[in-house]
Image: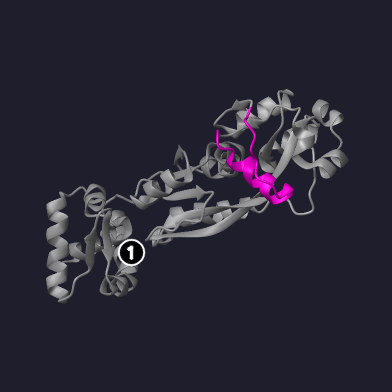
Amino acid sequence: MQLGWLRTFVVVYRTGSFTRAARRLDLSQPAVTQQIRGLEQELGRPLFERHTQGVKPTAAAEQLIRSVQGPVDALDDAVRRQFGLDRSQRPVYLGGPAELITARVLPAISDLIADGVQFRIGLGLADDLLSELEAGLYDLVLSTVRPRLRGIEATPLVDEVFALMGSAQVAEQIPAEEIELLGPEALGRFPLIAYAEFLPIIRRYWRSVFDVRASICPAVVVPDLRGVLAAVRSSAGISVLPTYLCAEELARGEVVPLLEPEIPPINTFYLANRIGALGREQIAMVHAHLRMKAQVWT
């Protein structure tokens, strides 16, 4: 049995695809296929079943991965260190939503950057970033949804709290008591600023707080919550925003919660990584650092 076969097996298991594994290993797909077949012949049992979107591990593969992925990662790191390819010098590839990255993550890792840690930051939607994490393009991803991909593990990081926001001028025109009494009807005269045409955040707030479905046509759609905040701050309209993004504006009184429900809607951010990645000291350090700093995010 060749050690390289086990390394290829680990990468195929984590990516769920011979094609993605070949790209990550810098091999041809036939070479990856041949190595897996050689390993299967050596073990006397199949390891993967092909399907339309890649491959699915068999029970034998699930048993094997638990035994070999740690030693394979450790040997890989040892070889890199021995031959001057220490991964501690490699940038940490980190992905997440633009708003959280700019408002909280970059300030949180500024001390690591000052100490010499290099980062490559990617911005995008959770599903896209998690797929790229699975394919090996990222080391860590901050996700607004719980990952359900094979080979990916996730740690709950922080809860974002959503609030119905307006400028101080708008808040003077609409008492909270009126909103509590009339619900969404009290908001009808104010333009609605939305993150997306289908109102994902607003729909959730309406359902959770008012127990009704939001059926409103937004006045403005801007696919960046920082843009939504800028419109709300300038009295263009009202919206639902995560409070962490508005912390400074709230402190200065530039935006105001129009309603303070007893149980506000929340959403959990997850810090995701490929299984085994935290065996690398650099990634484990950034992972622990973000978990510590997230405790004071609001």
Three-letter amino acid code at the position of disc 1: Ala
Where disc 1 sits, the SS reads helix
Q: Quadrant of the N terminus?
A: bottom left
User: Relative to residue 216, is residue 27 drawn left or right?
Assistant: left
Percent of width and height locating residue 130: 42, 49
Residue 249's quadrant in the figure? Answer: top right
Name which residue lies at 82% across and 31% down: 171
Q: How is the image coloured?
A: one colour
Residue carrying label 1: 74
Q: Position of residue 238 (x, y in %)?
A: 72, 31
Q: Is residue 203 magenta?
A: yes
Point 63% across, 38% down: residue: 215
The answer to which image quadrant residue 114 occupies is top right
Apparent side of residue 30 relative to residue 216 in the rendered image (left or right): left
User: Up-down: is 77 above or below 240?
Assistant: below
Badge 1 local density, few (<14 within 10 Å), some, or many (20+)? some
In the image, is 218 to the left or to the right of 4?
right
Q: Is residue 193 above or below residue 158?
A: above
Query: Is residue 90 in view?
Result: yes
Q: Which residues are magenta?
A: 197-218
Is 80 in front, or is 146?
Answer: 146
Q: Answer whether residue 200 is magenta in the image.
A: yes
115, 178: nearer the viewer: 178
Q: How many marks?
A: 1
Q: Nearer the viewer, residue 160 or 54?
A: 54
